[in-house]
Every structure is written in C-alpha cells, then in structure tokens.
C-alpha cells in the first residue's frame, strides 16, 4: 500500500449541497482494497428526511462495517454551493477531537470547549492531522482483520510522524490548549500501548520510527519543549533477568512520560561582543497512568508501582558556531559533606577462668549529608551539558546505573519504599519531579561576535530521560531502567 493519504479537508470542503447529490452516500477512498482485504473509506450520508447528514468511516470488503460515525450535522444555507460552511467545519473538527479523547481513560469530556477555526493557519493540515489521528485509533480498536490493521497502522504511523504532520501538530496543540493536549496525548499513547502490547504478546516486536511526540516553542525570552512518550516504547537500558509478574507488567506498561523543559533566554549587547544568556525556568517530568483506577485495580499490581525519573540530561548547542566566541557555565551542586564521629563503648563481663574479664571495643561511624538529586554542568565544545542525577541516600550510588541490594528491596524503610508518600521522598506526591532554576541549575551564557546582531540563531536542545523501576509497596526483586531521547530546535533573535 502506498504511504500517501488523501486531503480529507479539501474533499469535505468541495462536497456539493444535498440537492445536487447523484448518489447517497458519497465516498472517499482512504485505503484501496486487495482481493482478500477490505477497503477503508470515509463516506458522507444523508438521513432519511434529508435534513441532516453525517460522516462515517467504514471498512468494506463483502459487508460494510461502520468503524466510526460522527454526530449529525445540518447542511449549509441553500444560498451556498457547498454542503458545509465554516461553522460546520469547526463543529466537525470538535467532534473528531472529542472522539479521540473518548478513547482515553477520562470519559468526562463534556466540559471541554474547542475554538473556532476561521483564523487558524494551515487549517487543512491541522484538520487532516486530527482526522488521521482518529483513524489511527479507530484502526487499532475497531478494525476486525489483523493483516488489514497492521498495514493501516504502519502507514498511518509513518504519516503522523512525518514532517508536515509534526509541523501541524504545533498549531493543533496551541488550539487545544494544555489541559486538552494532555488528555489528547494520553488517549493516543494508550492506543499505542495497547497495540504494541498486542504485538509483543504475539512475539512481533513493534517500534515506532519516532517513539515519542515532542514539539518546541520559541518566544520572546522563552524556550519551551514539551514531550510525551509511552513507557512501552522506551529503550531498556538494564533490567533484572527475573520477569515481572503479569499484574506488575500491566501496571508498569500502562504509563507514559509527560515532560516540560522551560528556559529563559536574554540577549545583552556589550561593547566588545553580544552575550546570550540561558537559565532554567522550570523542568517537570511526570509518569502518568493511562488507564483508569478501576482497571488498574482489576488487572494491575497497583497504580503506585511505576517507574520514576532517575536521571535527566540536556545538551544545548548553537547549530551554526562561526560567530560564537566562548561558552561559560555556572556551578554544579556542592559535593556532599561527611561528618565523622568516633563512638566508644566498654563492656564488662565475669569469666569463670579469671577473676574479672574486661572487654573493650571502639568503632567509627560516618554520616553523609547527601541531597537525593545532584546537578552538574559541563562543557563540550560550545555545547552546554546539564545533568541531574538521583542518588540512593543509603549508599550514595547513582540510581539509573545501579540496582538496589536484596536487603534494601525487602527493607520497608528504604528510601524508595513508599516513595510517593514518605516525608523524605525525592519526588512529588504524584511521582514526578520539578526542578526550578532557583535550586537546581545556574545560568549558561555564550559570547557571540557582534556580527550576529539582526540575525536569528538556532539552538539544538537534545535530551535524555532515564526512568527506573524499583518496587514501591510490592515485594519483588524485579527492577529495570528505560531511556528516551529527544531533539528539538529553538531560536533566538539577536537584537
């Protein structure tokens, strides 16, 4: 099957009014059929009284199967030569995105409001992105034939991660707003998780060409990178050979990462050069469950049995460096303080063989004052490297590259036991982390030749997130660490 898909928005806009229909319904072929596989089509069909119409996605081989049906719409005024006006397009767009959200675990979406589309840039691309995302979910959940599903999903996956779709996604996310965006991505990533889990159950490993969704925004004084990634598609760095139980596997797999990286940037024009300063505004990373609480209790070990962030690494690099003069970084976290004290004790006991037996013992104890998260800055060429490491407060080892001892795994007082409710937890109560610039991270700054004034300079933000699982409340020796990588481009106007 060819990987190209039709322009659904253009087709819808050109639909004639019902009075001019030669057939009912009118059909758009989305996926051509073969001798043994169905055809995937979008149709528009009128109601019996011809006052309203609706859109339907069908799989048609011998018998048409309705996979999704829109709500009914009224046709446009008889004065127009089209079936649909701008108001109906906006209503259909909202209906499509509402359907996407309903595939997620949060079914209460009646309070959501979607904006009008009359002034939306690249409207055709944005509308098509929403439609093909819905088609992606419909193919995962509704299509009956396994071979047909596999082919459709593979090509839709490539289409949705292509350049045009990724560009349209930024506009779409702005339209949806942050709250709806999170629900939208949770719904999509739940579908990806279910599909990948189904493939793995049949020993058919499935990986997306881009296993996460990310986008960046560059504004006056602000860089922002937002990303979402299902746990199930992250690369496994290390894991315990003993397999996790079925219930624990369900809990671990049905989560995804939501992360935000926000930086402040400032341009200062000096006498000899231009200084471009970047500092950390906010870094947030959460591991969010993709299914509702009742399903997690029914099939999973516990919603609190999930991965936690154990390392975050960022690299900020100016892409064109011919006018860069130098790079400076701030200080890293202070090294942990050690307090050494000597405890002495004397024990006396009566021995039958001697008049008095006296036993003396002395020992040293070392106390280490260690923050759970350590921040380090370093330089590679003109790249600024920012690293946050989580440490085991008992032995000081980096968590992402080590595993706990068997004693610690069963010790209820280990720091990673009850890690989301303990007063000394290194995470938020929800299980994520928040790094603010006032505590973790100093500024970094580049000195640039004054010839850069009036130009726009691009920076690459490349990042890695490590997520580790150590048992929380459950008694198990299973542990693992997974990693994701992202790369985004942001800009600075030197003025």
Image (spheres, rainbow, N blue to C red):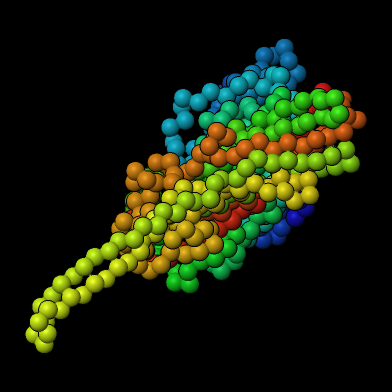
Q: Position of residue 394 (x, y in %)?
A: 40, 58
Q: Position of residue 265 (x, y in %)?
A: 70, 30
Q: Is residue 282 visible?
A: no
Residue at 60% of width from left, 59% of height from top? 235
Q: Position of residue 18 (x, y in %)?
A: 68, 24
Q: Nearer the viewer, residue 76 or 451?
A: 451
Q: How many discs mark residues in the rendered view?
A: 0
342 lies left or right of 316: left
Considering every residue shown, the one lying at the far bottom of the view is 353
Screen quadrant of the C terminus = top right
Residue at 44% of width from left, 72% of height from top? 242
Residue at 89% of width from left, 41% of height from top? 322
Q: Nearer the viewer, residue 255 or 280?
A: 280
Position of 155 relative to 245 (above/below): above
Position of 178 relative to 406 (above/below): above
User: Where is residue 429, by image quadrant?
Assistant: top left
Residue at 43% of width from left, 46% of height from top? 426
């Amino acid at each position: 099957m060819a990987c190209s898909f039709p322009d659904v928005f253009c087709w819808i806009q050109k639909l004639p009014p019902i009075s001019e229909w030669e057939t009912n319904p009118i059909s758009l072929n989305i996926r051509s059929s073969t001798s043994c596989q169905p055809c995937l089509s979008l149709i528009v069909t009128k109601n019996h009284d011809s006052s309203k119409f609706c859109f339907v996605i069908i799989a048609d081989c011998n018998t048409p199967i309705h996979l999704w049906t829109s709500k009914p719409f009224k046709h446009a005024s008889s004065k127009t030569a089209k079936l649909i006006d701008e108001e109906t397009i906006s209503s259909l767009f909202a209906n499509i995105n509402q359907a996407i959200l309903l595939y997620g675990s949060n079914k209460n979406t009646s309070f959501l409001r979607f904006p009008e589309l009359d002034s939306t840039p690249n409207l055709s691309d944005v509308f098509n992105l929403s439609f093909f995302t819905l088609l992606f979910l419909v193919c995962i959940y509704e299509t009956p034939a396994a071979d047909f599903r596999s082919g459709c999903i593979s090509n839709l996956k490539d289409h949705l991660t292509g350049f045009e779709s990724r560009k349209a996604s930024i506009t779409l996310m702005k339209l949806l707003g942050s709250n709806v965006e999170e629900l939208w991505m949770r719904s999509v990533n739940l579908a990806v998780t279910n599909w990948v889990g189904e493939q793995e159950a049949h020993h058919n490993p499935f990986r997306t060409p881009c296993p996460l969704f990310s986008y960046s925004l560059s504004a006056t004084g602000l860089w922002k990178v937002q990303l979402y990634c299902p746990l199930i598609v992250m690369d496994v760095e290390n894991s315990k050979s003993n397999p996790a139980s079925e219930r624990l596997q369900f809990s671990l797999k049905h989560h995804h990462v939501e992360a935000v990286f926000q930086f402040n940037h400032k341009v200062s024009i000096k006498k000899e050069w231009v200084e471009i300063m970047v500092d950390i505004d906010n870094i947030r990373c959460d591991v969010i469950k993709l299914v509702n609480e009742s399903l997690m209790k029914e099939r999973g070990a516990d919603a609190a049995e999930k991965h936690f962030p154990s390392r975050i690494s960022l690299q900020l690099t100016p892409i064109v460096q011919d006018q860069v003069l130098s790079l400076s970084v701030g200080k890293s976290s202070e090294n942990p303080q050690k307090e050494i004290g000597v405890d002495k004790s004397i024990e006396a006991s009566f021995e039958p063989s001697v008049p008095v037996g006296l036993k003396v013992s002395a020992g040293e104890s070392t106390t280490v004052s260690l923050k759970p998260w350590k921040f380090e800055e370093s330089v590679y060429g003109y790249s600024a490297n920012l690293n946050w490491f989580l440490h085991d407060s008992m032995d000081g080892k980096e968590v992402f590259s080590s595993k706990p001892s068997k004693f610690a795994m069963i010790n209820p007082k280990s720091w990673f036991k009850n890690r989301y409710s303990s007063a000394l937890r290194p995470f938020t109560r929800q299980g994520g982390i928040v790094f603010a610039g006032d505590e973790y991270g100093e500024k970094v700054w580049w000195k640039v030749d004054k010839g850069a004034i009036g130009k726009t300079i691009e920076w690459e933000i490349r990042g890695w997130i490590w997520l580790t699982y150590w048992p929380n409340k459950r008694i198990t020796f299973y542990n693992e660490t997974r990693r994701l990588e992202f790369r985004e481009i942001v800009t600075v106007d030197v003025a």
